[in-house]
Amino acid sequence: MIRAVDVEYRYPDGTIALRGVSLEAGRGEKVVILGPNGSGKTTLLLVLAGLLEPVRGEVLLDGKPLKNQLPDARRRIGVLFQDPEDQLLALTVGDDIALGPRQLGLSDAEVEERVRRVAETLGIGGLLDKSPHKLSGGEKKLAALAGILAAEPEVLILDEPTTGLSPSRKRVVEKVIVEAARRGASVILATHDVASAYNLMDKVYILNSGCVVASGGRELLLDEELLRSNDLEQPLILRLYSVLVGGDLPGSLEEAARRVAERLR
Ligand SMILES: Nc1ncnc2c1ncn2[C@@H]1O[C@H](COP(=O)(O)OP(=O)(O)OP(=O)(O)O)[C@@H](O)[C@H]1O
Ligand SMILES: [Mg+2]
């Protein structure tokens, strides 16, 4: 449903951030982008969102050039920026979360219902009357994510959605991402967190210096050398799994840990 084809992007100062990147996410598919600082993850997400225009290559939404579908297509694509300060605009958290659903022309009651539901799911239901600028770092991330989820976009583009979150919140965010995909959304997210990536992904792309250096399924994350050379930390449990259990990889690290424990008993 959303596809980048041979995308090159150059910033105005001449930095070439993407050098011929291709990637695709189908309906209901979760695609994770991993890579070291400065590898081009954020740039790629902004290009996919139609917020940066590539100098070469193109982005296709439903097989047609995204740029010909703008600005209408913006409504179908939700973007969580790496820095939530860039997107928290309203005077209260509640109003901020409501911006997206309101643009869809929903009734006030429906908007309010969605705001409450999403805020409660993410554990920020008690913060709706607060100024977004007076939230903690993690709360800002959750508030920004709530605003995107409340609009129920078909494409979710999430730049480091779990960064800075404590473990239980991280699990909640992983769960809402999985649920959004189950409802049919295409999800593309960038992260440094290989453990979160493992639990979330159907497919992974590893970026380095603006190029895709590897792409595939969970088995890629067993390749210690590939991870090391791209400044990614392999979760210890994965190393143990590959040494002690081997074979098909389970869908979550928790399951991998269970099987390792069984083997050790
Ligand atoms: N506005 C900008 N102007 C010029 N160069 C930029 C700009 N934003 C990013 N870059 C450069 O583009 C390259 C890719 O940056 P990008 O933000 O996409 O990396 P990233 O993979 O998201 O990194 P991080 O993990 O630190 O978030 C880097 O070399 C960076 O210095
Ligand atoms: Mg980034």
Image: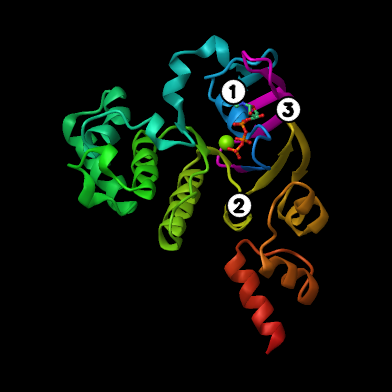
| Horizontal relation, residue 265 to residue 117: left or right | right
Give, as a three-letter code, the residue at label 1: Val
Counting from the top left corner in percent of width and height, residue 64 is at 61, 16
Question: Considering only vertical position in the picture, is 256 above or below 205?
Answer: below
**Quadrant in which residue 144 is drawn:** top left
> Residue 221's mark?
none
Q: CA distance from mark 2 to mark 1?
A: 21 Å
Q: Quadrant of the N terminus?
A: top right
Residue farthest to the right, as pictured = 225
Q: Quadrant of the C terminus?
A: bottom right
Q: Which residue carries the number 3 mark? A: 21
Callout 3: few (<14), some (14-19), or many (20+) C-alpha neighbours within 10 Å?
many
| Visible residue check, residue 223 | no
Judged from the image, the secondary structure of the residue bearing numbered disc 1 is helix
> Residue 47's mark?
1
Give, as a three-letter code, the residue at label 2: Ala
> Residue 197's mark?
2
Callout 2: few (<14), some (14-19), or many (20+) C-alpha neighbours within 10 Å?
many
**Quadrant in which residue 167 is drawn:** bottom left
| Visible residue check, residue 12 | yes
Q: CA distance from mark 3 to mark 1?
A: 11 Å
- The boundaries of the magenta stretch are 3-31
